[in-house]
Image (cartoon, helix red, strand yellow):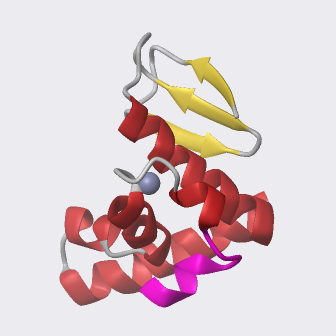
Amino acid sequence: MIVIRVPFLWVDGMALFPFVLVRTARPDAVLLHHERIHLRQQLEMGVLPFYIWYLIEYGLRRLHYRSHYEAYRNISFEREAFAHEGDLSYWKTRKWYGFRRYL
Ligand SMILES: [Zn+2]
């Protein structure tokens, strides 16, 4: 994982395989782990398919929930990352395409 600080980033962190972009100089371990899970998702899907799927799923969930925040939190990639971001060894034992459990 290659961490790059981007002070003008509009979110706390963003995975863009093989990089993790972060806004602050000292991102916490949970944030970095959350982004590491997204790197795994991107590695198995490919970065472009990941983001295409992400946007399509966001759009569908936005129609369903009618809320940006609820739509974002319920994207399968985010569900997996939020569910396991506190377990710092999850990425080591995670099965490929683990996000499918959160569809
Ligand atoms: Zn995320």
- How many numbered tags mark residues here? 0
| Location of residue 98 by image quarter | bottom right
**Residue 61 x, y percent position in the rendering:** 34, 82
- Residue 72 image position (x, y, % from top left): 33, 65
Q: Residue, x 45% and y 77% (percent of image)? A: 76
In the visual, does 13 lie left or right of 42? left
Q: Is residue 48 left or right of residue 70?
A: right
Question: Residue 59 versus residue 32: which sits nearer the camera?
Answer: 32
Asked if residue 64 is among those painted magenta in the image, a careful observer would answer no
Tell me which residue sits at (61%, 34%) in the image: 20
Observer able to see residue 90? yes
Ligand 1 falls in which quarter?
bottom left
48 and 91: which one is in front? 91
Tell me where residue 37 sits by quadrant.
Answer: bottom right
Left or right side of 38 for 50: right
User: Going 44% across and 61% down the picture, which residue do you hit?
Assistant: 81
Residue 11 shows up from this direction: no
Range of magenta residues:
94-103
Residue 49 position in % (x across, y down)? 74, 71
Q: Is residue 64 above or below residue 24?
A: below
In the depicted structure, whether residue 14 falls above or below residue 97: above
Q: Residue at x 66, y 64 (%)?
A: 41
Pick out the residue farthest to the top. Answer: 25
In the rendering, at what x and y percent does residue 47 appear? 76, 58
State which quarter of the image contains the N terminus. Answer: top right
